[in-house]
Amino acid sequence: MSELTAKILHKDPRVTAIIVKSADAADWFAGGKSLAEQKLASYWLDIHITEGTNTKDEKAAYLAALFQRMGELLGPLHNESYAHVDEVGGDAYGFGGLTQERRYIRRQARGGAAEGGLSPTSSLPAGAPRCLPNTSPNACRSAMSTSAMVTAGRDRPAK
């Protein structure tokens, strides 16, 4: 998941945190039956990103790739497997004791030098602007982190 998050959403894996929880397939219901009864797996993913740092197309591509990858990891998936990309305002989200907005402000005060050795444009695709047009400073992609929590249910060992 960290690889997909880096590749598609352009998030730096060095500031990505992932929590995985398992649920017994007999206790997970989708479509009115347990996953164990259906012999299917499922997942619920909740990922937090800084608001305005990804396009609708990037988020759609991420959800499609995630569904495919989770199927490879868990086996046949129930269609009712969910992912939620939660865009959080930069003034209400951060890591290491700093909001993303403060991280951006500090970097700008240093002339664009990134915190923690990160390049100001390390997470941007080639040719992308340093900050997205028509967004607040806290939406700058170089001031970002990602966290995700995955809950997975299956009735057989993971691949």
Image (tube, grey):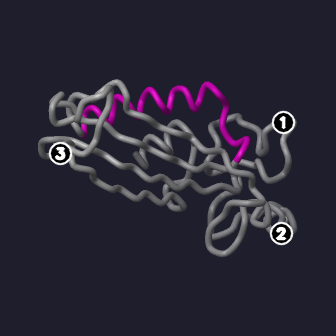
Q: Residues within 10 Å of mark 2 (few under 14, many from 20)?
A: few
- Which of disc 1 and disc 3 is earlier in sequence? 1
Quick one: SS at disc 3? loop
Q: Amino acid at mark 1?
A: Pro
Q: Position of residue 6 (x, y in %)?
A: 50, 45
Per the model, the C-alpha gap separating discs 1 and 2 is 22 Å
Quick one: SS at disc 2? loop
| x 50%, y 33%: residue | 62
Examine the image and state in which quarter residue 113 appears. bottom right
In the rendered image of this protein, does residue 15 appear above or below residue 4?
below
**For mark 1, what is the residue?**
133
- Please tell me whether mark 1 or mark 2 is closer to you in this view: 1
75 and 100: which is toward the camera: 75
> Is residue 32 on the magenta stretch?
no
Q: Position of residue 156 (x, y in %)?
A: 12, 42
Q: Amino acid at mark 2?
A: Arg
**For mark 2, what is the residue?**
110
Left or right, residue 120 beside residue 77:
right
The reply to whether discs 3 and 1 touch (Cβ–Cβ < 8 Å) is no
- Please tell me whether mark 2 or mark 3 is closer to you in this view: 3
- Magenta stretch in the rendered image: 51-73
Left or right, residue 67 beside residue 142:
left
Q: Amino acid at mark 3?
A: Ala
Extreme-bottom residue of the structure: 97
118 and 90: which is toward the camera: 90
**For mark 3, what is the residue?**
158
Quadrant of the image for the C terminus?
A: top left
Q: Does the magenta stretch mainly form a helix, a strand or a loop?
A: helix
